[in-house]
């Protein structure tokens, strides 16, 4: 015997969740060379948004490459799949009303366009951390540039693999020319200004 559904349940919408959080879900995609300052800026933005009562999530190599993308390497095919999975995960956060910060080298315009297409152009904001190679290599936080120069790391962006600069980023930040606080504030302003369009 078929039981009548007395209490029909409909899925909560993105708008319902954004109203609950009083914020707009969006993706801020940081791209740039390793050591350019992508994750450092993202961490500062997360802290400032938290101070303002806004919910934020950072996606970067530390939590993606060790988890959902642990089995991927650095071939062109694996890099593309890495970006595709990041974008799909990010879209889930964005659709929940969460401000999502993705900090990845994402070296080609094709990869970044793939992410934009998955997330949706109206929710995708690109920040190019354009710190020059010389400065990134000088920092060499994880010793990767030195290893790449010795030929121990293959397909390393900036050394043995090219990086395509974004054509029309929402922001262009060179961390060798300005303090971290200025960079963080620029991204926060972008987020706050973009949020006014919807919430």
Image (cartoon, rainbow, N blue to C red):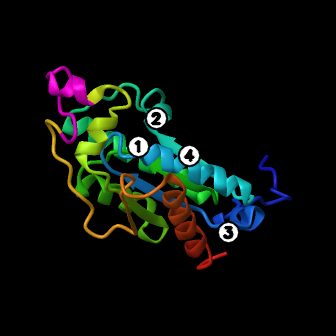
Label 2 packing within 10 angstroms: few (<14), some (14-19), many (20+): some
Label 3 packing within 10 angstroms: few (<14), some (14-19), many (20+): some
> Horizontal and vertical percent for residue 37?
41, 46
**Element at label 4:** helix
The image quarter in which residue 115 lies: bottom left
Who comes first in sequence, dot 4 or dot 2? Answer: 4
Residue 15's mark? Answer: 3
Q: Which residue is mark 4?
A: 43
Who comes first in sequence, dot 2 or dot 1? Answer: 2
**Element at label 3:** helix
Asked if the magenta segment contains residue 147, the reply would be: yes
Asked if the magenta segment contains residue 93, the reply would be: no
Q: Residue furthest bottom?
A: 197
Q: Is 8 positioned to the left or the right of 85 in the image? A: right
Q: Is 145 positioned to the left or the right of 128 in the image? A: left
Residue drawn at x 74%, y 67% is: 22
**Element at label 1:** helix
Q: Which residue is mark 1?
A: 85
Disc number lying in front (3 or 4)? 4
Disc number lying in front (1 or 4)? 4
Q: Is 50 positioned to the left or the right of 75 in the image? A: right
Who comes first in sequence, dot 3 or dot 1? Answer: 3
The image quarter in which residue 142 lies: top left
Who comes first in sequence, dot 3 or dot 2? Answer: 3
Q: Which residues are magenta?
A: 145-158
Q: Which residue is mark 2?
A: 64
């Amino acid at each position: 015997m078929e039981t009548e559904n007395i209490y029909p349940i409909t899925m909560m919408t993105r708008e319902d969740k954004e109203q609950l959080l009083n914020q707009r879900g969006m993706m801020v995609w940081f791209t740039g060379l390793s050591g350019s300052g992508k994750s450092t800026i993202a961490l500062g933005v997360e802290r400032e948004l938290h101070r303002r009562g806004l919910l934020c999530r950072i996606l970067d190599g530390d939590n993606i490459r060790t988890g959902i993308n642990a089995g991927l390497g650095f071939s062109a095919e694996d890099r593309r799949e890495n970006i595709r999975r990041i974008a799909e995960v990010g879209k889930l956060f964005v659709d929940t009303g969460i401000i999502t910060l993705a900090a990845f080298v994402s070296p080609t315009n094709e990869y970044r366009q793939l992410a934009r297409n998955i997330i949706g152009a109206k929710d995708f904001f690109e920040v190019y951390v354009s710190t020059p190679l010389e400065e990134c290599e000088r920092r060499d936080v994880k010793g990767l540039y030195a290893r790449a120069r010795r030929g121990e790391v293959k397909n390393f962006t900036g050394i043995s693999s090219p990086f395509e600069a974004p054509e029309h980023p929402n922001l262009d930040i060179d961390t060798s020319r300005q303090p971290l606080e200025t960079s963080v504030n620029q991204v926060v302003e972008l987020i706050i200004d973009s949020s006014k369009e919807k919430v």
